[in-house]
Amino acid sequence: MTLSIVAPQIQIQIEDFGGSFTMPHYVHSHPSANYFNSNLMVSNFMVADLTSNNSDVFFYDERAQGKDVDAVCNLRFTYHLEKFKMLLNHKIAMQKTLFVILDNYVGQNKSQLVMQFFVLLSIMFYSKVVLVYLIP
């Protein structure tokens, strides 16, 4: 007999970009000449899982990818795949419903590609995916 822990039936999460900053970052010192030669932008993307009370923050620089819909879907897929692997290793059942709260940014959250991505999630990991867009 195998013992499996039952997870809550619904997973509630909020996703958004947190912003970008330049590297290297000089706080109170005067930047040297290399500051003006290399403005490397570092972006972060955050997924706040309200069900498990955890937040995951992804940091990456502009050489890896941008902040467009492809980058967002790549980060989202990485998050859900890692979550699925972790639950599988601990023999915990995946939640049946994913409830996602997003902002109204058209380029990252309201496009056909994003809708197709969440359909993919409903086929691979969840029975139902519910998207809620905040009022602008």
Image (spheres, rainbow, N blue to C red):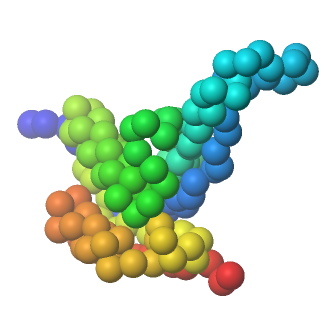
Q: Residue at coordinates 80% horizontally, 20% vertically from top-left?
A: 31
Vertical order, 55 against 101 (above or below): above
- Taking depth in this image into account, of 88 and 73 the one nearest to the observer is 73
Q: Position of residue 38 (x, y in %)?
A: 60, 27
Q: Position of residue 49 (x, y in %)?
A: 51, 52
- The residue furthest bottom is 135
136 with respect to 73 (left or right): right
Judge whether residue 19 can be spotted in this image: yes
Vertical order, 73 against 123 (above or below): above
Which quarter of the rendered picture does the N terminus lie within?
top left
- Taking depth in this image into account, of 91 and 4 the one nearest to the observer is 91
- Number of marks in the image? 0
Question: Splitting the image into 4 quarters, where does residue 32 fall?
Answer: top right
Which quarter of the rendered picture does the C terminus lie within?
bottom right
- Taking depth in this image into account, of 18 and 121 the one nearest to the observer is 18
Question: Splitting the image into 4 quarters, where does residue 2 fall?
Answer: top left
Q: Residue at coordinates 58% horizontally, 77% vertically from top-left?
A: 104
Q: Position of residue 116 (x, y in %)?
A: 26, 74
Q: Residue at coordinates 65% horizontally, 49% vertically from top-left?
A: 19
Question: Splitting the image into 4 quarters, where does residue 114 fall?
Answer: bottom left
Judge whether residue 8 can be spotted in this image: no
112 with respect to 62 (left or right): left
56 with respect to 10 (left or right): right
Q: Residue at coordinates 26% horizontally, 64% vertically from top-left?
A: 121
59 with respect to 72 (left or right): right
Vertical order, 27 against 93 (above or below): above
- The residue furthest right is 28
- Taking depth in this image into account, of 8 and 62 the one nearest to the observer is 62
Q: Position of residue 105 (x, y in %)?
A: 56, 73
